[in-house]
Amino acid sequence: MVVQVFRICSQFKTDRAAVSAIEYALLTGFVAVAIISGASILGGRASGTLNDAASKFQTSSSTAPGAAGTAPTAAPGTAGGGGASVATFRKP
């Protein structure tokens, strides 16, 4: 029994294909971990940036003249309306 175990183990010493397969598997695992960690870091940063831009866009669109819920007090070009250079935004 012990002799058979030593014989099998000695075959693994001379078999270089198994060693190469293990090396490639480890290398593939390390590359996969690097890609996953990089994607999660960049994904978190991109998500934060997009959420920040969305909140700024919502804030600026809700305070624009003619936006929903904010009616202008006077028409442009009239007294108190801001003159002809003020643009009014209308929802389509």
Image (cartoon, helix red, strand yellow):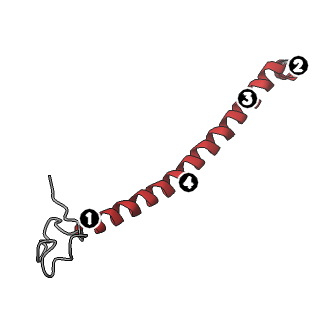
Residue at 12% x, 76% y is 78
Label 1 to label 4: alpha-carbon separation: 30 Å
Query: Which residue has dot 2 on it?
Result: 14
Residue type, mark 3 in image:
Tyr
Residue type, mark 1 in image:
Ser
- Marking on residue 24: 3
Position of residue 21 relative to residue 78, above or below, is above
Residue type, mark 2 in image:
Thr
Query: Which residue has dot 1 on it?
Result: 61
**What x and y, as percent, mark residue 10?**
88, 21
Residue at 79% x, 19% y is 17
Position of residue 27 relative to residue 60, above or below, is above
**What x and y, as percent, mark residue 36?**
57, 44
Give the camera-side residue of 19 and 36.
36
Query: Which residue has dot 4 on it?
Result: 41
Mark 1 or mark 4: which is in front? 1
Among the two numbered marks 3 and 4 on one chain, the one whose residue lies closer to the N terminus = 3
**What x and y, as percent, mark residue 14?**
88, 19
